[in-house]
Image (spheres, rainbow, N blue to C red):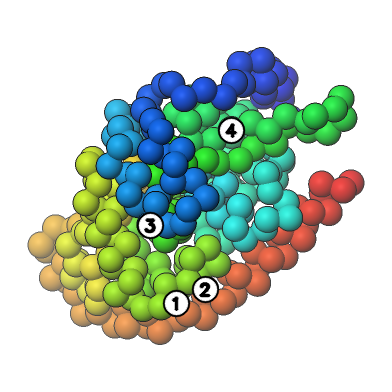
Amino acid sequence: MSDSGSHDIEEADRLDVDDDEGIYNVGTAVDRHRGHGDDAHRDAVAVVDAPSWRLTINEARVLGSLIEKQFTTPDLYPLSLNGLTLACNQSTNREPVMSLTDTDVVAAMNTLKDHKLARFVHPTSGRGVTKFRQVSEDTLGLARDELAVLAALLLRGPQTSAELRTRTERIHAFDTVTDVEQTLQKLHDRRPSFAIRLERQPGQKEARWQQLFAEETDFSWSSSSSESGSRGATNASNAARADELAARVASLEAVVEELQTRLARLEEVF
């Protein structure tokens, strides 16, 4: 890791304190809901102040990766800097694929910590490394289903409800696509809104949902009328084929992710 990254971690270590003040006024209602299930999380949302900021693309990738790994690889969580950087840059379950450096990740973590969305976990003795975890569900009053959907949207951009159902199953198992839609609506109904339903574009079988919690990569969903006309037939056939392959791709991604997890575990040891 670069000297700059080491300095940032040392500074974060010195400044790392737990407090109930800052951008969010979580109050006592959020404290009361901890440990009392998803309903209590939802009841607490009304008393959480809306964020006055929007995460950058890097910060969104770091937060999404932390949420994902908290549930998919709990034995490696909280994550070391190396593990978190690998999670951010993995080639599966990410759109777009990124190449963040350790310094990029530490800078994003410092901002997430300032927003009370993540924390540094410092070793209790002289040995060991600083690790990182997210606390967005406490700060934002998110239920497990909302957390799962938000993480998927942060990591992979706009997606259909059916895609989200498949891609969130390791964090929260939705029984039906309708259940996913209900969760998306809850995120949409927040003020400010955390998600929005995009208009279905020519060649797409279903509408997609996009998160509004962070900056979004330009996926260029819209096109000019002339481009739409010339490519409409091709897009329609491609969409049908893409939907057919989605389940197979999700299965292969899970296998690759498991292999990457095992590699990260070996790197932690050696």
Give neighbour class at mark 3: few <14, some 14-19, many 20+ (Cα, 10 Å): few
According to the image, label 4 marks what residue?
119
Marks 4/2: CA distance?
30 Å
Whole-percent x, y for residue 80 in the image: 71, 40
- What secondary structure is marked by label 4? strand
Residue 133 vertical placement versus 246 (above, below): above
- What secondary structure is marked by label 2? helix
Q: Nearer the viewer, residue 221 or 5?
A: 5
- What secondary structure is marked by label 3? helix
According to the image, label 3 marks what residue?
39
According to the image, label 2 marks what residue?
250
**N-terminal label among 3 and 1:** 3
Whether residue 125 is visible, yes or no, is yes
Name which quarter of the figure residue 256 lies in: bottom right
Marks 3/2: CA distance?
30 Å
Marks 2/1: CA distance?
6 Å
